[in-house]
């Protein structure tokens, strides 16, 4: 299934994208797609209602696409999780996952404008596979058990400001938590459709020029392991988002470091999970 949220910020309506391309209204089942919905078996109820033909059609004409899950409790990020990306940045391959947090308020819709922070000279792009947690995860016993806690997957744009990230603090959060720095969506794709775990290609282009073209098979730490590992150090709650890392091709690792400027357009996609487009503007 492909779950999404349509409407103005803060007033999104939950919906299902049917196989025939129609949008179906989920307002009769839930007020929103959020942690409470995921924890209470919401996707299963949507599936049953859809199969029974009980979901009314929704006219999506002119409606904005929001992030597919309402503001998460936390956004957990994994850095340097693709071999080629670690190499291009000059970093050694990590022996353990590199974990940092991102302000949940950075999560916006997949086509929303992204703001380059004031004083920024090194705003960078990163296409990533996002995991949306569907069940409380605490001290999980195995990677296999961890995969049972996944509600679905989505395209994530982990926008970064490299000077803020690398030069202004020994931790990365300053360069990761600027407003609008995490477009998410367009859909939350359930594991039965995306794969258990998914094996997917990722792509990103800036102003029409391909910059990133990678594959999840090149992750250093796979999806199940990451969730299992994180559950040893924090409790993952339904609705939380995990950004799983980016492949090579970021501005930081390219000749001339062509960082983003106001007016630039970024297109990104992941197989089966949809595509995003953002235009960048000055904050």
Image (cartoon, rainbow, N blue to C red):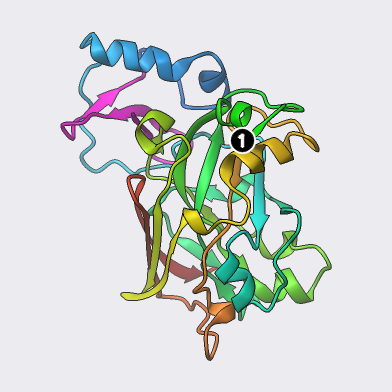
Q: Is residue 54 above or below residue 32?
A: above
Q: Residue furthest right?
A: 170
**Residue 235 visible in the picture:** yes
Left or right? Give the position of 86 relative to 206. Answer: right
Q: Is residue 207 visible?
A: no
Assign the N terminus to one quadrant of the image. Answer: top left
Going by the picture, which residue comes out furthest to the bottom?
Answer: 256
Front in this rendered view, residue 240 or 139 = 139
Q: Quadrant of residue 45?
A: top left
Label 1 crowding class (10 Å Cα cut-off): few <14, some 14-19, many 20+? many
- Please tell me whether residue 87 is drawn above or below residue 34 in the rendered image: below
| 86 part of magenta stretch | no
Quadrant housing the C terminus: bottom right
Check the image and report above or below for 235 versus 78.
above
Q: Which residue is mark 1?
A: 240
Q: Is residue 3 magenta?
A: yes
Image coords of residue 196 (percent x, y): 46, 34
Residue that appears at 35% across and 13% down:
28
Residue at 36%, 43% (x, y): give it: 65
Residue in the foreground of this view, choosing between 221 and 40 = 221
- Provide residue 67's location: percent of width, then percent of height: 45, 42
Picture residue at 66% right of the left edge, 53% below the top: 78
Position in image of residue 145 (x %, y %):
62, 26
Q: In the image, is 193 to the left or to the right of 218?
A: left
Q: Which residues are magenta?
A: 1-27
Disc 1, SS = loop
User: Quarter-wise, where is residue 118 in the image?
Assistant: bottom right
Up-down relation of residue 133 to residue 219 (above or below): above
């Amino acid at each position: 299934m492909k779950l999404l949220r349509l409407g103005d910020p803060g007033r999104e309506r939950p919906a299902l994208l049917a196989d025939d391309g129609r949008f179906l209204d989920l307002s009769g089942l839930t007020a929103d797609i959020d942690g409470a919905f995921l924890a209470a078996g919401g996707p299963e109820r949507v599936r049953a209602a859809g199969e029974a033909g009980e979901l009314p059609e929704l006219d999506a004409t002119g409606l904005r696409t929001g992030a597919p899950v309402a503001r998460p409790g936390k956004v957990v990020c994994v850095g340097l999780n693709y071999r080629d990306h670690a190499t291009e940045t000059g970093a050694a391959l990590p022996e353990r996952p590199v974990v940092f947090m991102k302000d949940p308020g950075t999560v916006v819709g997949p086509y929303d404008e992204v703001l380059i922070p004031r004083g920024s000279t090194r705003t960078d792009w990163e296409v990533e596979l996002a995991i949306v947690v569907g069940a409380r995860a605490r001290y999980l016993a195995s990677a296999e058990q961890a995969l049972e806690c996944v509600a679905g997957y989505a395209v994530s744009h982990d926008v970064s400001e490299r000077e803020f990230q690398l030069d202004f603090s020994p931790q990365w959060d300053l360069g990761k938590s600027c407003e609008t720095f995490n477009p998410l969506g367009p859909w939350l794709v359930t594991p039965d459709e995306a794969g258990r775990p998914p094996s997917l290609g990722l792509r990103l282009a800036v102003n029409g020029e391909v910059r990133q073209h990678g594959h999840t098979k090149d992750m250093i730490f796979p999806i199940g392991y990451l969730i299992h590992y994180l559950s040893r150090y924090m409790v993952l709650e339904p609705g939380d988002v995990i950004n799983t890392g980016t492949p090579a091709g970021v501005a930081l690792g390219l000749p001339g470091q062509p960082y983003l400027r106001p007016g630039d357009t970024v297109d990104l996609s992941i197989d089966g999970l949809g595509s995003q487009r953002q235009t960048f503007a000055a904050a």
